[in-house]
Amino acid sequence: MDASINIAVENLRKAVTCCVCLEYYSFPVSLGCGHGFCKICIHNVMKVKSICPVCSRSFSKRNVVSEDHLQRKIEGVVLFLNEDRLKDDGPSNTK
Ligand SMILES: [Zn+2]
Ligand SMILES: [Zn+2]
């Protein structure tokens, strides 16, 4: 596969991956600092301490902005990422 496509796919994957649970976002929220997480992940973070897991800036509940409108886009990206043509190996050797 073309290396630049690999990099683009990898960047895309990072863009939709939560750095707390390392899964694709489910119902993303963003903090005042601009970093995004799953809604459930940031709730777990807030139980301990309200600081951004990425940049350690403190935030309050008011700073947690729901990005529900991104959920469908993320699902679309995840579908794209899961497509077989992006995998190097796989049962596609039909001759
Ligand atoms: Zn998460
Ligand atoms: Zn942050």
Image: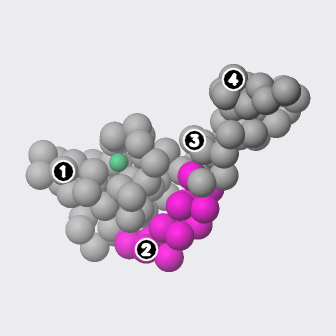
Q: 32 or 75, which lies in front?
A: 75
Alpha carbon distance from label 3 to label 2: 19 Å
**CB atoms of marks 2 and 4 within 8 Å:** no
Q: Is mark 3 within 8 Å of ligand 1?
A: no
Does the stretch in magenta take in 71?
A: yes
Q: Secondary structure at mark 3?
A: helix
Callout 2 environment at 10 Å: few (<14), some (14 to 19), or many (20+)?
Answer: few
Stretch of the chain drawn in magenta: 65-78
Q: Nearer the viewer, mark 3 or mark 4?
A: 4
Secondary structure at badge 1 equals helix
Q: Earlier in the sequence, mark 1 or mark 2?
A: 1
Residue type at the position of mark 1: Asn
Q: Which residue is mark 4?
A: 89
The mark that comes first in sequence, 3 or 4, is 3
- Residue at numbered disc 3: 14
Identified at 79% across, 29% down, the residue is 94
In the image, is residue 16 above or below residue 75? above
Q: Which residue is mark 1?
A: 44
Mark 3 or mark 2: whose residue is earlier in sequence: 3
Q: Earlier in the sequence, mark 2 or mark 4?
A: 2
